[in-house]
Amino acid sequence: MKNQVKKDDYKLLFKRFTLKHEFFTHIVPVPAAIYYSIITLQKFDSITIYTLIISGITSATILLILGTIVRYYYLKKIFSYLIPTENYQIKKELLFLPYFEAILIMIRWVIGVIQAHVFFALALKYFTNEFDWRNHITSIPLILFIIPIEMAGHFLITENEIRKYFQTNILKTLTITEKHKHINIFLQILFFIFSLVNMPIILFLSMNYFSTENFHLKNITLHMITITLILLYPLLHISYYIAKKIRINIQQIKKSLEEVSKSNFDEKLGMLSYDEFGELAIYINKIIDKLKEMYYSLVYLNKNLEKKVEERTRELQESLQKIQELKTQQDADYFLTTLLLKPFVNSYIENDKINQVLEYNFFIKQKKEFFFKKNSIEIGGDYCSFDEVQLKNKTYLFFINADAMGKSIQGAGGILVLGSMIQSALQRNKFFKEDQMLSPEHWLRELFIQMHKTLETFQGTMFITAVFGLIDVESMSLYYMNADHPPPVLVRNKEAFFLNPQNNLSKLGLMIEKKSLFIHTYQLQQDDIFFIGSDGKDDIELPNGNMNENEFLFLDILNQSNYTLNDIYKLIQLNGKIKDDLSLLRIRVLEKPSIEGQKLMNQKKEILNLMTKNHLNKEIYEKIFQELKYYIDLIPLDNKMLSLYAQIAFKLKHFSEAIEAIERLLMREPQNSSFLLIASKFYNKLKNNYLDNHLSHYISSVVNG
């Protein structure tokens, strides 16, 4: 456990700073400055030299004492904030201390050099009654090459000592929440390099100037070598501290991320400096907090699911156990991620009702391929899966094809997040009756919003394109949503064509509005083949070296194939080199929809005939309502009859059924004026009464939007 901040800590810091700062300054830079001043004297008699030395030492001593006093009282003032609510103020002031020390040493040198030359001029005048301005012009290059080195040294020494102090107490992980000005790390390192390069340049130029006939400097090469050797210590000192500053910050980030990989979210980064490393620590800590929250939310959810969820959990635990065994191997990171992805991929459903009428499979070829224990393994951001969904006592085949932003490990991370959200939604559908009472449109819409809201928390670092949907295995009604994914393709009577190529939603993770969501629908027939593919099927480098720009190339490939995924993949390879992850999902209708066509047509005519009667009483409306309900259950994609059903239900005050029906229509055709007019009538009549307890937001957003 970290120690509390003590009021007397300023004394400890004062001793450390004073010892290291003054040793750094007076062991080399001060003697170097005196030596430089001596060799540029115009007269080399003992009185002049001793006077210069005594003047320099006297000035340095005075400024040492004054600088020490300023440092002592400044540190004491910082620790005067010592109450629990003001710890952040102490850290804020300590983080600024390196800048303070750099400015302080600059002021000390400027005043010290001027003061030393004043003492020297007065003393020399007193003893020899002489004054030569050339003895004092050397102060300008002296200041120019000494001060940058001193500022860099004092800044790095102070920052290093502050960092050591933070490691011993609670100030390490304390975050400065308010915005602060900082010198970015690029400018800092640029200044440090300047301080190192500046010295020999100033020395060379100044000594060349002082060797002219107006001055009497001799043997400039020897003097330059001597001063450079004297200043070798601060040069090496500064270089060491620059490397140490970068190394410690990188080690701190590495250590924290290693702990997160072990599911330990309590190892936070310390904000140890006022630069990008400090800001990076704040942002990484926020990410760790988000991951911690998500991790424990998933743990809680897993503990409360039924037996089938426990089976999935065991699979994950087995994967995690393997991950722990392999964690020490640096080259196993990709392999560990592929183990985590396996529980989220489902290629077969144990449901005869689905398997008798639909043939479904998928193909995934990730761009990143690596070898682990002599096995070839792929990892990437493409994803496919199938599952069973029960809605309103009907069975649906759920399908998804997705492509997460980024290559290899980054894309796989997006699929991990997406897969966990989909599994959560599927498990809810298995165990919660209220979820099973939703219409397919409402279920898909809620799944889209859940996935989007979760990805939105990554603040623009994780986007996913996807096509996901449901197929009613009785009526063969297709419902799907397209989140900026390549449009699906339908093959009917051996002719391939795109479904709704222009009407796409935004990527998952981008800003959306609920009223902008819509569901695509399509009536499938026997022998129809439904394809979805990622953009890898189009991102092909042609034999001439150019990238494919023909958006209909995939349709041509389908028409040349036998419609099996392996054959399609081979034909894509023949057309060029695949440059991205590739995934293909295929669903084929094996049997005709279980609908008695002529009987339903007669039923539809009977409903319409009933509507033409002059005198419609409640009994007739109830009969129409029941007939429509049965008809729509068998042919759910007949929008005209669903619209009639909504109006009849509303007239009979079956408000829940009416609202659900009009919402389904608006999700299919959000710009249909007839449906908007009906929704407006419902909303205007019910918004202050019945709708308060129902889903009024969607209708009001469309009507008022």
Image: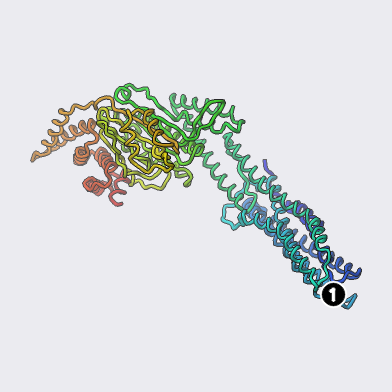
**Dot 1: element:** helix
Q: Can residue 675 be seen in this snapshot? A: yes
502 left or right of 374 in image: left
Q: Position of residue 689 (x, y in %)?
A: 27, 46
Q: Is residue 652 visible?
A: no
Q: How far from the left and from the top, in percent, is residue 73?
A: 74, 60
What residue sits 40% from the left and 27% below the top?
A: 347
Q: Would you say 569 lies left or right of 89 here?
A: left
Name the residue tied to disc 1: 122
Please identify the residue farthest to the front as the structure is shown: 544
Q: Residue at x 41, y 48 (%)?
A: 511
Amino acid type at image mark 1: Leu
Residue 397 sits above or below residue 677 on the image? above
Q: Position of residue 361 (x, y in %)?
A: 37, 27
Q: Which sits in the foreground, 559 or 365?
A: 559
Name the residue at 50% across, 32% down: 369
